[in-house]
Amino acid sequence: MRYFIELSYNGKKYHGWQIQPDAISVQEKLNYAISTILQKKIEVVGAGRTDTGVHASQMFAHFDVDLELKANVVFRLNSILPDDITVYEVLLVDDEKHARFDALSRSYEYRIWLGRNPFLLDFSWQIHSQDLTISLMNEAASLLLEYENFQCFSKVKTEVYTFNCNVTEAIWKLEGKELVFYISANRFLRNMVRAIVGTLVDVGLGKVTVADFRAIIESRDRGNAGLSVPAKGLFLTNINY
């Protein structure tokens, strides 16, 4: 039988979602909790990967087991998991349902705080400039919907079968001092959102024009794009099936 797990996590202490040999990951903690409850080795399959320090307000994973889980499984998992990982639901699904390959789209938010706020240090990139021209940032962001190849925003040393992504939303919204970038696509490349945000901030600061931003996309060269912004401002927020 196959089960889906819906969870969220604060990524501050973790070296991303995926298990690594010499670092703590979210996947490792979840495997341990499920294996402990079921008294057998269980390995979950995540809907995707998040990098070191990135958060997820919604993440899905699946695992297989040859028994029916009890109604209190969510309570038991949360009693074992650390406080910065929370399971919300465990659902029985069809055996063919796949957390990663059946996902139709994924959405991220990148949160910037314009100024200083000690209570948001772990959950936003705080910049002390009020000089961002958000209208230009949105004009440039809209260009993402015109292209498919985003090699210029991908981590250089990565093994992928394609750099193509179908971006369906890319927009900045300002509420008070919080500036949030919303982006949705069928898939994302490693480091893609953080590189896009860094380049769009350069547009907002007048370092890069909208025409330059288009040229950067068309160049397919990571060296032409902006810096990767800090991971702590990035949240995986929705996975659609």
Image (cartoon, rainbow, N blue to C red):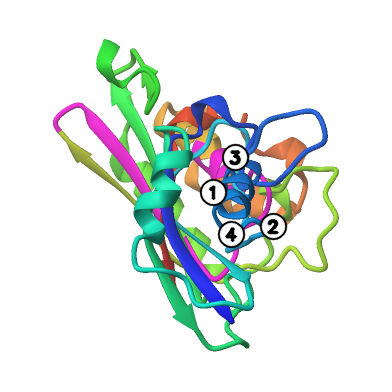
Residue for badge 2: 218
**Badge 2 amino acid:** Glu
List x then y, in percent, for residue 113. 30, 24
Q: Which element is circle 1 on?
A: helix
Look at 52% across and 73% down and name the residue there.
3
Q: Residue at x 50, y 77 (%)?
A: 68
- Disc 1 vs disc 2: which is toward the camera? 2
Q: Nearer the viewer, residue 45 or 35?
A: 35
The residue segment tinted magenta is: 176-197
Residue underneath mark 1: 211
The location of residue 190, given as percent across then percent down, is 68, 48
Quarter of the figure with residue 20: top right
In 3D space, how far apart are the residues under numbered discs 1 and 3 (Cα atoms)?
Answer: 17 Å
At mark 4, the secondary structure is helix
- Neighbour class for label 2 at 10 Å: few (<14), some, many (≥20)? some
- From where the camera sits, is residue 22 visible? yes
- Count of number-bearing discs: 4
Q: Mark 1 and 4 residues: CB-CB less than 8 Å, in contact? A: no
